[in-house]
Image (cartoon, rainbow, N blue to C red):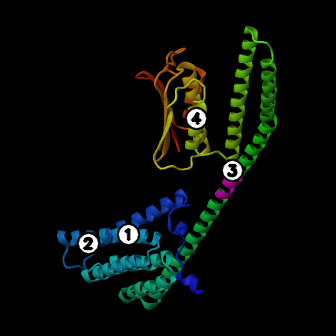
Amino acid sequence: MTLETWLSWPSREALSREGLTRARRNLARGIRAVVFGGLLWSTFSSKQGPGNGAWTWAAGVALVLGCVLLARVFFRFTLEHRLWPSLGTLLLVMGAAAGARAAGWPVLALVLWCGCAVTALERLPLGAAVPCTAVALAAYSLVNNDNWLTTAVTAVGLGLAGYVLRLDAEARGSAQRLLSQERAARAAEAQSAALGERARIAREIHDVLAHSLSAQLVHLEAARLLIEREPPGEFREKILERVVAARGMAREGLAETRQALSALRGEMTPVEDFLHTLIEASGAGTGLAPGARVQVEGERRALPAEASQAVRRVAQEALTNVRKHAPGAVVAVRLEYLPDEVALEVRDSGGSKRAGELAVSGSGYGLLGMRERAELLGGTLEAGPDEEGFVVRLRVPA
């Protein structure tokens, strides 16, 4: 064996109960219950102690319960790979065994020494386990009343049992690590496939929709220039108004298409930068009053793509509703980064007129779509009148 073999701990997977079948767990619980019951019975039935009064039994029960508590502490220390606390706890159990022997409970002492020998080999580095096991088995051999051959065979068997349990635990730990690696590889493969599919969809959208919208913009701009050359008149003004509106819609559609492409490729700008850009664009002659502002609170961090996209779409839809139903309103946007979620609030002051109040219940496809988008992510969306204006509040896990 190499020096590393002597000094290395069993893996955490080997020391934990992960990977144990229900049958093995039930068997382990049954063995512990039998051992615990046997220890209690040995303290009550022993005739070698200083009397059999209630105090003697109480002391025996307290000793057994203390050893059980020390065993649990030892298991926790070894799971955390803390060598000196583990050795100290094991020595305390050995000392309790010596005390039990001196107090007249030989069976309890023998069981404790045997348990220390086996457990040390199973859960400690071999460099520390072998000396501890040797001390425990030596104490067992000195106080055992059987003949020397039986004692020697029992000691060797206990040592082999501890080492076999160690090998079994290591094999189980290796299987758990391989299973975790396989799951991680499958998750990475699925993520890679999803990214590849999203990239393919992004290319299709770019080649078809983005090119089509760009061509429409060119044609609409050409139509606008041609119409402006015509003599002034009511018909000319109506056509020009429709062409300008169509050009604006095409430009907005192209911008949203580019944002969707960026989302599919994972190249989205930070949410707060997007909100600032959105407010600036919305205030440029689109019906909103000047003075719109964006307030960002909390520690900024990168958001998951789904949460980021939900915040962007809800902000866009809320500002669109303000332009439609509250022209001339002052808008305040607040983005708050919370520990486990992100919150968006879009509030308007109320315009000079309203084309139709948005119902709190969610009437209207835009508001309904925002609420469905939030609920799909496990979040919430609230919308309704607030003082003189209207407020939309979004919360999504992030």
Farthest top residue? 234
Q: Quadrant of residue 212?
A: top right
Residue that carries the numbered disc 4 in the rendered image: 280
Element at badge 2?
A: helix
Q: Quadrant of residue 20?
A: bottom right
User: Spatial distance from mark 3 to mark 1, Cα to Cα?
Assistant: 41 Å
Side of 162 where 255 appears, left or right: right
Residues at marks 2 and 4 touching, judged by CB atoms closer than 8 Å:
no
Q: Eyeballing the image, is 188 above or below 92? A: above
Residue at 50% in and 80% down: 125
User: Spatial distance from mark 2 to mark 1, Cα to Cα?
Assistant: 20 Å
User: Spatial distance from mark 2 to mark 4, Cα to Cα?
Assistant: 80 Å
For the residues carrying marks 2 and 1, which lies nearer the camera in this image? 1
Amino acid at circle 3: Gln
Please tell me whether residue 379 belongs to the stretch shown in magenta: no
Residue at 50% in and 65% down: 16
Amino acid at circle 4: Glu
Residue that carries the numbered disc 1 in the rendered image: 73
Q: Earlier in the sequence, mark 2 or mark 3?
A: 2
User: Spatial distance from mark 4 to mark 1, Cα to Cα?
Assistant: 62 Å
The disc label shown at residue 60, or none: 2
For the residues carrying marks 3 and 4, which lies nearer the camera in this image? 4
Q: Position of residue 372 (x, y in %)?
A: 57, 30
